[in-house]
Amino acid sequence: MIDNIFGIAGTAMNAQLTRMNLTASNLANQNTTAPTEDEAFKAKRSVFKAMLSEADTHNGAQFVGGVRVDKIVDVQDPNPRVYEPGSPHADAEGYVWMSNVNEVTEMVEMMASARAYQNNVEVVNTAKVLMMKTLDITKA
């Protein structure tokens, strides 16, 4: 039972770490330009899936439950076209395509994923303390 708590919290921490890494990548590519809309950077988001049965877990998992990253998708917001005639990516009219990354949205994503990660760290720490107290009770 207790190992299930560690497993579930661990999968959630891994999922949030992926979310944080995607957000960091989005922020790093915020000001990139491209010559075409198809080549312009699209912000990415992770889509989570609950692991509710043994079929959802990875082979050899010791527990059922938790969450995993199901897929990574592009944000569908449009990429803005900006006038930058001096850019090497500028077309004949002097326009480039910018990334569709919204800095405010990304900062909210980063804070939310960091808080979710920290909450799962607290779950692990609390479970560890409870397990140690249970062992102390059985020794007495």
Image: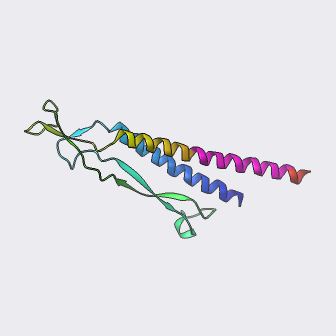
Q: Is residue 52 above or below residue 76?
A: below
What is the x, y in percent for residue 28? 36, 37
Residue 63 magenta:
no
Q: Is residue 116 left or right of residue 22?
A: right
Residue at the limit of the structure toward the top, as seen here: 86
Q: Is residue 55 left or right of residue 73?
A: right
Residue at x-position 52% and y-position 62%? 50
In the rendered image, residue 124 lying in the magenta stretch gets the answer: yes
Judge by depth and name the residue closer to the eye, 112 or 59.
112
- At 17% from the left and 46% from the top, the residue drawn is 36
Q: Quadrant of the N terminus?
A: bottom right
Q: Which residue lies most toward the left here? A: 92
Which residue range is magenta in the image?
A: 118-136
Would you say 64 lies left or right of 26 here?
right
The residue at the point 70 percent across, 48 percent down is 126
Q: Residue furthest right?
A: 140
Q: Position of residue 128 (x, y in %)?
A: 72, 48
Left or right for 3, reference 112: right
The quadrant holding residue 61 is bottom right
Could you say where residue 106 lies in the image, as x and y percent from the top left?
40, 42
